[in-house]
């Protein structure tokens, strides 16, 4: 098992370097189209991108902010990526994020006078479980009733968002109840700042650990191997005696939990209290992050940082160049489109090459497996 | 007297149900074509959003709500064509491209709405649709006010149901579409151009999504607001599945989901004491419940979601 895992790790690092070309081209093309949209609005694309970069990377504070924005994107990217590896589509990270934030805030408020090394982990775990249960619900609906997780996860996004809105307007509202927000969590439940003078908090380190955990789980454990096989070919996995239903439940729970951690970081690391609509769509951005990073640990990290730059610089762009922040969505959408279309061209190349040299075919198939989901 | 009040309540409710069901129905009707041709389009939400803004912008610049609808339908058709290129010709993953279209729709409409209409200004007066009472028919007790006192787009949507049913199940074209969705290879063998049929289905699906979006902004709500579709594209997708890929079944599903929406408004207005956020959840919870309760037994077109490769 170890040698196989090692071999996988080898191909995947090599594949990662080779596949860097596609995302870079995709990003460049997407930026060009974004520039075209900005020009169409009668604004200056050059000034827009300049102020975007300035805002995201021009100062320590900017860099801190970029990593702050990248943190939830790492979690939601891992969330989508893990589900995808298991053959599932999780469009519910947004809702899982909200529920994760809610659960961590409840623990953060309810417990008082606890030492930070107990209270903080408890609040984080609560957030993970909160998001995980929402993911598990979609998994269960799929396994039990055959309900498409694509639609149930989307529907639950809205349910979770409204539920958080209800909680901060009702049961969790801070007395005397002038604003729809919860009281602040105890200091012992807050993620400490790790870069002085910025908002960068411990959640970023946890996100990096989550990336490692993602790699270890998928490529170094037998359960992870099973998940990938089920994701690749559920029928074959069934013949091999693997339990696809159990894997679906497990994967949706873990994916949901990762989505929940995105909410934990936002609430315990930045806001320190819960209010409605606290996510500007980090859950959906995770889909782009995961696709751009080909679901590989390093890829997801790099893609999250890229989108962190877009997010962190977006505000400066709006201020300095008058370009709506929402143009960032347009750029992200085109990145996804180009990556998705390019992946196909690469598959054609692989096929042509495989047809030409039958000898190399076996090696390429292994690469195809690691790349494909 | 009490009875009359109840009847009035029911009439109002059913009329509201039809109004809120209609965007779902229009988008779902388009989805029936794409799904029957073997393509899953979860990007319909984004296409609807673009239709909403295009409709308002068209009406604003051209001064006529019908021209707004035309612009929305064209915009939807162009998106449908682009979608078809990506999933049919480039054979990209349909779910991934669909997701990208949703993000694209949100980004484009949010950005351009700001540029076209400014940020903090009051919505400008635009030509929009008003309810039109159908002569004679609207005078029928109960049925009249429920069915025959709506904007023209509602009648259009209702007419589409039998038309689409006829096309799908009574014409050669419908047979071709269904064949492509069930068994593209076999369809190809008997000389049907799988690519053309799928392109056509995607374009028609996009046009109807655009129409559905313009209904939202020109008839139901009378202006464009950020992300105003609020998941209706996905609910329409669920309605197609729930309605087992038939126009009539989809109409029923749309009315069911619309009822959830209408009920939510009604309970909010009635000051029921139930927190409004919980009421807002109703359509989404209903969608999940419907999917879980019935869809296990529905059978999707066999080739749904799979790109076709000519050998």
Image: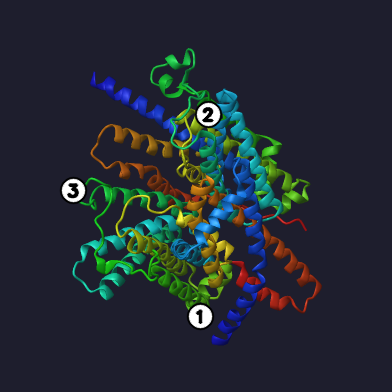
- In the displayed structure image, the side of residue A76 where residue B311 appears, left or right: right
Q: Are marks 2 and 1 in contact (CB under 8 Å)?
A: no
Asked if residue A17 is positioned above or below residue A51 in the image, the reply reads: below
Say few, some or many: other residues with alpha carbon within 10 Å of mark 1 (under 14 / 14 to 19 / 20 or more). some
* Number of numbered discs: 3
Measured as percent of width and height from the top left, residue A67 is found at 46, 65
Any part of residue B202 in sight: no
Which corner quadrant of the image does residue A101 belong to?
A: bottom left
Dot in front, 3 or 2: 3
Which image quarter is the C terminus of chain B in? bottom right
- Distance from disc 2 to disc 1, alpha carbons, whole Å, reads 56 Å
Chain letter of disc 3 in the image:
A
Write the residue at 34% across / 34% down. B265
What residue is disc 3 on?
A: A176
- Distance from disc 3 to disc 2, alpha carbons, whole Å, reads 50 Å
Point out the residue furthest to the top here: B136
Any part of residue A193 in sight: yes
Say few, some or many: other residues with alpha carbon within 10 Å of mark 3 (under 14 / 14 to 19 / 20 or more). few
Chain letter of disc 2 in the image:
B
Write the residue at 36% across / 29% down. B13
Point out the residue furthest to the bottom here: A3
Q: Which mark is residue A220?
A: 1
Q: Which mark is residue B158?
A: 2
Which corner quadrant of the image does residue B46 belong to?
A: top right
């Amino acid at each position: 098992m170890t040698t196989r895992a090692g071999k996988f790790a080898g191909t995947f690092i090599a594949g990662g370097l080779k596949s860097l070309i596609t995302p870079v081209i995709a990003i460049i093309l997407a930026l060009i189209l974004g520039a075209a949209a900005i020009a169409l609005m009668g604004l200056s694309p050059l000034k827009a991108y300049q102020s975007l970069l300035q805002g995201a990377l021009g100062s320590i504070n900017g860099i801190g902010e970029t990593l702050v924005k990248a943190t939830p994107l790492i979690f939601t990217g891992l969330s989508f990526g893990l589900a995808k590896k298991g053959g599932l589509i999780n469009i519910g990270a947004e809702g899982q994020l909200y529920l994760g934030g809610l659960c961590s805030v409840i623990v953060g408020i309810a417990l008082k006078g606890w030492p930070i090394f107990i209270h903080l982990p408890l609040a984080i775990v609560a957030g993970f479980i909160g998001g995980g249960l929402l993911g598990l619900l979609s998994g269960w609906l799929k396994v039990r009733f055959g309900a498409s997780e694509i639609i149930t996860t989307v529907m639950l996004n809205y349910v979770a968002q409204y539920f958080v809105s209800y909680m901060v307007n009702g049961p969790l509202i801070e007395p005397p109840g002038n604003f729809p927000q919860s009281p602040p969590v105890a200091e012992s439940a807050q993620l400490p700042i790790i870069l002085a003078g910025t908002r960068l908090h411990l959640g970023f380190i946890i996100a990096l650990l989550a990336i490692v955990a993602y790699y270890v789980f998928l490529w170094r454990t037998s359960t992870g191997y099973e998940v990938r096989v089920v994701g690749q070919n559920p029928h074959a996995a069934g013949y091999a005696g693997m339990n696809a239903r159990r894997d679906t439940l497990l994967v949706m729970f873990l994916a949901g939990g990762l989505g929940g951690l995105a909410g934990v970081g936002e609430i315990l690391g930045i806001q320190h209290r819960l209010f409605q609509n606290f996510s500007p769509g980090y859950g959906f951005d995770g889909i782009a992050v995961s696709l751009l990073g080909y679901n590989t640990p390093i890829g997801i990290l790099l893609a999250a940082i890229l989108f962190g730059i877009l997010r962190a610089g977006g505000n400066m762009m709006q201020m300095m160049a008058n370009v709506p922040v929402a143009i960032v969505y347009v750029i992200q959408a085109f990145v996804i489109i180009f990556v998705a279309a390019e992946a196909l061209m690469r598959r054609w190349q692989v096929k042509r090459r495989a047809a030409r040299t039958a000898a190399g075919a076996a090696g390429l198939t292994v690469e195809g497996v690691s790349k494909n989901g | 007297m009490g009875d009359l009040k109840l009847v009035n309540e029911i009439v109002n409710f059913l009329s509201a149900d039809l109004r809120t069901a209609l965007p779902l129905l229009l988008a779902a009707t388009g989805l029936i074509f794409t799904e029957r041709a073997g393509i899953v389009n979860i990007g319909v939400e984004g296409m609807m959003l673009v239709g909403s803004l295009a409709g308002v912008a068209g009406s604003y610049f051209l001064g006529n709500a019908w021209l707004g609808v035309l612009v929305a339908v064209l915009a939807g058709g162009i998106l449908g064509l682009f979608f078809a290129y990506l999933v049919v010709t480039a054979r990209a993953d349909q779910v991934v491209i669909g997701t990208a279209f949703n993000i694209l729709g949100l980004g484009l409409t949010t950005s351009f709405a700001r540029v076209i209409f400014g940020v903090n200004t009051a919505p400008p007066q635009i030509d929009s649709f008003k309810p039109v009472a159908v002569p004679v028919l609207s005078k029928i007790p109960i049925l009249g006010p429920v069915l025959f006192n709506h904007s023209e787009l509602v009648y259009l949507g209702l007419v589409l149901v039998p038309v689409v049913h006829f096309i799908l199940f009574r014409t050669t074209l419908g047979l071709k579409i269904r064949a492509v969705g069930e068994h593209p290879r076999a369809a190809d063998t008997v000389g049907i151009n799988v690519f053309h049929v799928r392109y056509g289905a995607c374009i028609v699906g996009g046009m109807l999504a655009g129409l559905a979006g313009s209904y939202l902004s020109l008839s139901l709500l009378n202006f464009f607001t950020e992300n105003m579709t609020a998941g209706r594209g996905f609910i329409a997708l669920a309605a197609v599945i729930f309605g087992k890929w038939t126009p009539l079944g989809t109409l029923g599903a749309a009315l069911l989901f619309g009822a959830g929406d209408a009920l939510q408004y009604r309970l909010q207005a009635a000051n029921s004491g139930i927190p409004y956020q919980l009421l807002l959840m109703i359509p989404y919870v209903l969608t999940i419940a419907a999917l879980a309760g019935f869809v296990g037994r529905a059978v999707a077109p066999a080739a749904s979601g799979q790109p076709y490769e000519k050998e």
